[in-house]
Each structure stands twice: as C-alpha cells, then as structure tokens.
Amino acid sequence: MAGYVRFLFAIMLCIANMIIYGLKVNISTTIIGMVKSKINTNGNGSSYSAHECPQFEDTSLTMSADIEGPYSWSTTEQGLVVSLYFAGYMLGMFPAGYFADRFNTKWVLLISVFANSIFSLLVPLAAERIGVLLFLRFMAGLVSAANLPVVNVLVGKWVVYEEKSTWVAIINSGTSLGTVISILSSGLIMNSLGWEAVFYIHGVLPLIWCVLFAFFFADNPETQKFISEPERDLIVKSYGHRQPSNSGINVPWREIFTSKPFWALVVTNCFGNFVWYFLLTQLPLYMNKMLRFNIKSNAFISCSPYLINAITNPLLGKVLDYGRRRGYWSQTNGRKLAVGVSE
C-alpha cells in the first residue's frame, strides 16, 4: 500500500472549501436576526409589524418567525451587506488565478482561510457602523478569491490521475457541505445564543484547520515530511503531475480567449453560479419575510438543495472514474457528461 497522506491532504482541501463557503453565506441567514422588523403605525397611533405577504400571516407562526435585531438597515443596505462580498470576490479572482502558482500555494490558501476567520470574528464589532461592515464584507470576498484557484493548483500537485475524478468531486463537495453546515448551524445558533454567537463560533473553528494545515502539510509531495517514499513516488510519477514550480511557463492568452471550450465553460459557470448564489443569498430572507417560516425551519429548508448536491457530487465522481476505467467514456467526455448533468 502506497500510503494515505494524499487522501488526508484532499480532505483538508475539502474542509478548506467548507470553511470559505460557510463563512461566505452565514450572513445570508444571520441578517434575519440582525435587522429590526418593519414597523408601521395605524390611525390610532399604535404600532404593528408589516410584512410583504399578509396572506401568509398566522399569529402563532408570526411570533416565532420574527427575530428582532438591533439595526435599522434599509433593504438596500441589507442587499449590500450580502452582495459586497461577491464584488470583492469577483475583483480578486483574476489576480488570484494568475498568481496562484507563482507563490507557495499552501501559504496562500492558509492566509485566505485565516483572514476569513478573522473577518468573521470582527463582524459583530463592525456591524455597529454600516460603512465599516460593508468594507469588511468586501475585503472578506477579496481574500477568498484565491481559494478555488489555489485548490486547483494543489489538486494538480497532490491528486493521482487515476483517482482524480473521485477526489476532485469530494474536494468540490466541500462547497456544498460548507453551505449546508453554515446555513443550518447559523439558524440553530442564532435561535439559541443570538446572532453574534454565529460569527464567533464560525470564526474560531477554522483556526483549528489553520494550525493543522500549517504544521502537518507541505505545498507539494516533493517537500512533504510526513509521507512514505512509495506514496511520494506514486504521486510524483503520476500522469499530469504538476511540478513544484511552474512560474516560468508562458500563458497562451490568445489561445485561451479564442478557445471555444473556454467560452463554453464561462457561459456554463455564469448560469450555474447565478442560480447557486441567487438561492444562497435570497432564499433565507424569502422564507422568513414572505412565507413566514421560523428560523429553524428556514435553515433546514434553505440548506436542502446544497445537502443533495453534497451527496450526489462524490457519487458522480465515482461513476465517472468507473466508466473511464471500463472504457465507457474518455476523461474528456466524462467531464462533459458531468457538466451536462449539473446544468
């Protein structure tokens, strides 16, 4: 047996995806408990809560659906709190992708996760001033942009070709698992301990991953200390193994931007990510403000699409590896099949 360090490394990458995506979306649920209910005044001077869909009102349900927060943010400000993260994420994606393999990728990923953890811990303090919170959200998105490019580089260094479909599926399922755990735990923590506790708990736990990743794992198998020689040779001699330094490679920009498969992937990801993030950012608020679900039910329902995705992703990877080994399809056609199923 060659060893299992490469499997542990892949699991650490899966957890890194879980952390980044979990910290990305927890505010989509938590914002329900951060803002004050919309209050109107009737003709005799008494106040009452106003909701967008009165036909769904139920006195017993409404009492449990509303969580009174401390901040009087407008709907525009609430939208910016959620969306400015993605503005920073988009802006940081281009340089992050270019420089992903021009630095020690292990430390780039580590800094990305650590910075997200610190930014999460600062949210309750920053929320006292909306401008500071918006800046914090933008910066969190900016440092998170390195996550996926760096993970892809590390996959090229650590994952053996024959196991790639399975382990890439498991690593990518971390995005769904992190979303599920974040939405679900945010609702449960907020219901029991308050919205501030969500950011404190979610901010502290990733620090454990940072310590383990910093001390026990290297950027590449060539410099990894805790690994057997047979496993090191297996990875290094695997087809398509990425060498420790590829910074001298000239990027064929013209060929990339004139490639039809490249633009097909761009279009596919645009549509897929639109649906993913639309549900991610809007579903918890819709379930609360429109359909009047309480925070526990809201969290369970909102995370269900991502739970299904987290289960089916690794299964699809196993099917693709099985079909390639049996000669049912090539690696390229298997990837096309995966993209077609996902859309």
Image (cartoon, rainbow, N blue to C red):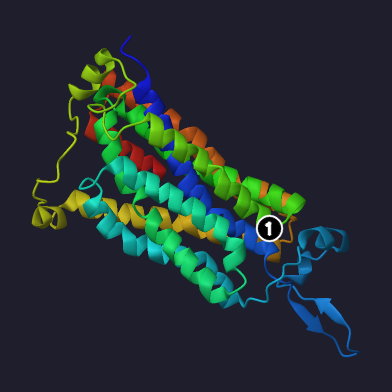
Rendered-image quadrant of the N terminus: top left
Q: Quadrant of residue 5?
A: top left
Q: x%, y% of residue 113?
A: 43, 47
- Within 10 Å of disc 1 (Cα), the crowding (few <14, some 14-19, many 20+) is many
Residue that lies at the very extreme toward the top in this rendered image: 1
Q: Quadrant of residue 75?
A: bottom right
Position of residue 36 in the picture relative to residue 271 (left or right): right
Q: Quadrant of residue 257?
A: bottom left
Residue in the image at 39% along x and 29% along y: 216
Position of residue 11 in the picture relative to residue 198 (left or right): left
Q: Depth check: 81 or 44 in front?
A: 81
Position of residue 186 in the picture relative to residue 209 (left or right): right
Position of residue 145 in the picture relative to residue 75 (left or right): left
Q: Vertical placement of 251 versus 62: above or below? A: above
Residue in the image at 71% along x and 61% along y: 291
Residue that carries the numbered disc 1 in the rendered image = 195
Residue in the image at 40% along x and 66% along y: 87
